[in-house]
Image (cartoon, grey):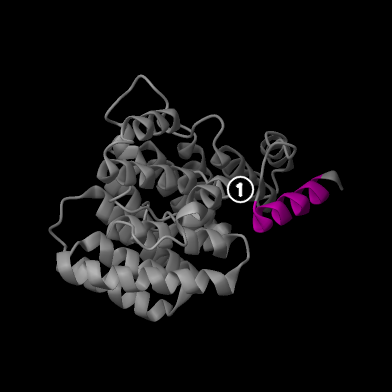
Amino acid sequence: MRIFLLLSIVAISFNALASENYSDHEAFCLQQSQQQCLPYIKTRLNDAKRNPADWYKIKTYEFDYYYDYQQFDNLFAAITPFVKQEHLPGIFKLQMYYYYAKTLNYIGKKEEAKVYAAKAFSQLDGIYDAFGDPLRLVELANLHYVFGSKKTAMRLLIDAEQRFAKNNDPIFHLELHVNKAHIYLNWQQYEQAIRSNLMAYNAIKHTNHHAKIVLASGNLAYSYHQNKNYKEAISYYKKAFDFTEPQSIYQAIYSLRLAQAHWQTGNMAHAKKWLSRIDRNTTDFGKGHAALYSKLQQALIE
């Protein structure tokens, strides 16, 4: 989970997506270098048909891949066959409910999303009590952020930060600080959001987790952007392109934000240049990004 990476509800802040360590598709795909990640996952799924434990585990990587790249139609289709099944491995069921709740929330089915968020809450409470996994605590905070109380979410994150300060897992520190930053952004405490997103970026920037570096760069850029630190925002949006796959939705999202930042600083030529990089015929923006694109397009025509 890119744990808070996964916050699709914050579409305006790049779905700061949250990713669970349990189903971290990128770490899984780092085991090989000859094949692209999704085809590799599909191949391994086929190979694991006779081993249900491995198959369910690998299936969560597929969920995670779709979530990280905001392929919500694919994610919805992948999860739906399992939703009504009761006899499933506990961790698999947790990941399924977690992603399904966020997917339903993203597509506007808010009440149904709450039902599955409650199921995920129940699973997470039991798993955290049993294993004390710090990432499970961050996931629990993430669900509170999306479906419950942001104050409760922040208390859980501060608890995780204090209790697991010596944890050496860069993904834990990434998810912890990205989640804190999302709450600060919601509270319009932009300086605090910048500090938290900078800590998240520093935790992951020297790893091979390129998808997470893309998101950490974009989240940091967005917090600078919201604080009207346009120079820094532009710099970190551009850094993200060093690790962004050519067909990734983030190519379009960060180009859109760069167009916006240049427009806000009065540099119309650069704003038009970045907006022109976006092909709306092939880009499936969420409502927030689609509205921003239309606004900029109209403003730059005038």
| Residue 228 visible in the current orientation | no
From the viewer's perspective, is 67 left or right of 172? right
| Residue 236 visible in the current orientation | yes
Query: Which amino acid type is marked by label 1?
Result: Arg
The segment highlighted magenta reads: 286-300
- Image coords of residue 162 (percent x, y): 18, 69
Q: Residue at x 68, y 33 (%)?
A: 277
- Image coords of residue 79 (percent x, y): 48, 52
Q: Is residue 155 above or below residue 25?
A: below
Q: Magenta stretch containing residue 296, yes or no?
A: yes
- Residue topped by disc 1: 257
Q: Magenta stretch containing residue 253, yes or no?
A: no
- Image coords of residue 203 (percent x, y): 27, 48
Depth check: 120 or 230 in front?
Answer: 120
Crowding around mark 1 (Cα neighbors within 10 Å: few <14, some 14 to 19, many 20+) is many
Depth check: 127 or 228 in front?
Answer: 127
Furthest toward the right, the residue is 302
